[in-house]
Amino acid sequence: MFDDLLIEWVALEPNSPGADKSIAELEIRRTTGVTIIAIIRGDKAITAPEPSEIMRVGDRLVVVSRPQDLGAFRELVVG
């Protein structure tokens, strides 16, 4: 964490509300203020994913946020 900037890694589990939904569908940035900068899927990295990218169980998301925004993101996407 750097002052007001937090870089976090989170994983999607089978019960995660964000699984099988797109970044745009959940309006992640608008509703939480968090930006997904990469999705790690298996041995592949999707950098700067498009809003249409569907998040899947097992994906590891690399996100940038303010510390106070991470809770809303976890609730919306990770569960």
Image: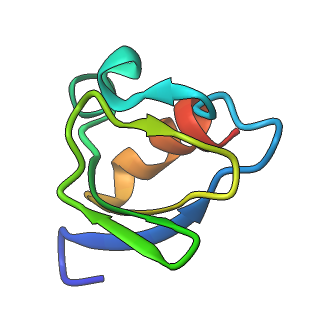
**Residue in the image at 66% along x and 28% along y:** 17
Q: How is the image coloured?
A: rainbow
Q: How many marks?
A: 0
Question: In the figure, 22 relative to 34: above or below?
Answer: above
The furthest residue to the top: 25
Q: Which residue is nearer to you in this view: 77 or 38?
A: 38
Q: Position of residue 39 (x, y in %)?
A: 40, 60
State the residue at coordinates (36%, 71%). Answer: 45
Q: Position of residue 13 (x, y in %)?
A: 76, 49
Q: Residue at position x 63%, y 34% from top?
A: 19
Residue 6's quadrant in the figure?
Answer: bottom left
Closer to the camera in the image, 17 or 68: 17
Quadrant housing residue 20: top right
Q: Residue 44, position in %: x, y?
A: 43, 72
Location of the N terminus (image quadrant): bottom left
- Left or right: 57 as drawn, with respect to 74: right
Residue at horizontal 51 percent and vertical 24 percent from the top: 21
Q: Give the image quarter of residue 47.
A: bottom left
Location of residue 49 with respect to 47 vertically, above or below: above
Expressed as whole percent of the image width and height from the top left, the position of residue 11 reads: 63, 60
Q: Quadrant of the C terminus?
A: top right
Residue reaching furthest to the bottom? 2
